[in-house]
Image (cartoon, rainbow, N blue to C red):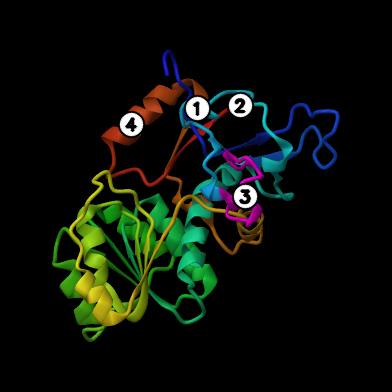
Amino acid sequence: MNGDFILGHECAGVVEKTGAKVKDLNVGNRVALEPGCTCGVCEFCKTGHYNLCKDVEFLATPPYHGCLEQYIAYPVNMCFKLPDGMNTREGALVEPLAVGIHAARQGGVTLGSSVIILGAGYIGLVTLMACKAFGATDITVVDVLSKRLKYAEKLGATRVIDASRCDSVKEILNKRDGEGTDFVFETAGSAVTIAQTPILVKRGGTIVLVGMEAQNVIPYDFSKIMAKEATIKSVFRYRNIYPQAIQAIADGKIPVQEIVTHEFDFAKTAEAFDFVIDHKSEVIKAVIKIS
């Protein structure tokens, strides 16, 4: 598309005005917006898998502008009211948390599960928090940036491994007596870590691919998958999760605000993007405040 394009798809705000047919929201309510509006009539929408709808209108996905603006008109069925005591900063973080919850749900994490998370960016960290909330009791997080690993420890990882300092695969297997884990989540979107997943998954375990690698074809050891009778699942956004995620935050079960390390005023949006790009080792999650 030509001309300027508005970015942003993780957002929350305050209702300024409602349409005549809106019944459940009032002016002044705080809401989180789910950024994908789907057709509602296709096979996937009808069966509850609306994240797979081919006709989705997703914020900041051309030709649909994003939410980095002071006002946005939005369908009421994708506006989720925030409970008393939950602020819009937390509301804006519901979107990435929904990815982590969907990943944990796709995998089938339950009480007592053992988990490896490859990548401790903010998607890796929300996956960590979701797995912990679902009952995982042994969680290993791997990354190459020390600040991310410190946050993983802070958020409840059982152990962290700095892949820049050791052979992370060998280190994990040594710590687990040669066995992998029930679940391996790839959140880094790296060909290297994707290729590690068959080695790290336990016999009969499940691999969940969350990160998006730009490379379409990746060498992969399917012989290990076959020998282990492992399951591979993938994640594309999320579905039917916003109410659950909002309640988990409001109840204090998932401290999603802990991942925010930087905040910028709306007037400094361009500087915010530049800062995040240029300081990847310092930033876990940055937010933009629109007043």
Q: Which mark is residue 275?
A: 4
CA separation in Å, label 4 and label 1:
13 Å
Q: Secondary structure at mark 1?
A: strand
Pointer 3 local density, CA inside 10 Å: few below 14, some 14–19, many at least 20: some
- Kindly check if marks 2 and 1 are in contact, taking CB atoms under 8 A apart as contact: yes
Q: Secondary structure at mark 3?
A: helix
Q: Say which amino acid is labelled 1.
A: Asp
Q: Say which amino acid is labelled 2.
A: Ser
CA separation in Å, label 2 and label 1:
8 Å
The x and y percentages for residue 222 are: 23, 69
Dividing the image into 4 quarters, which one contains the N terminus? Answer: top left
From the image, tell me which residue sits under label 1.
265
Q: Residue at x 55, y 29 (%)?
A: 67
The x and y percentages for residue 10 are: 52, 39
Near-viewer residue (217 or 199): 217
CA separation in Å, label 4 and label 2:
21 Å
Q: Which mark is residue 45?
A: 3
What are the residue bounds of the magenta stretch? 33-50
Which of the two discs, 3 and 4, labels the residue nearer the N terminus?
3
Which of the two discs, 1 and 3, labels the residue nearer the N terminus?
3
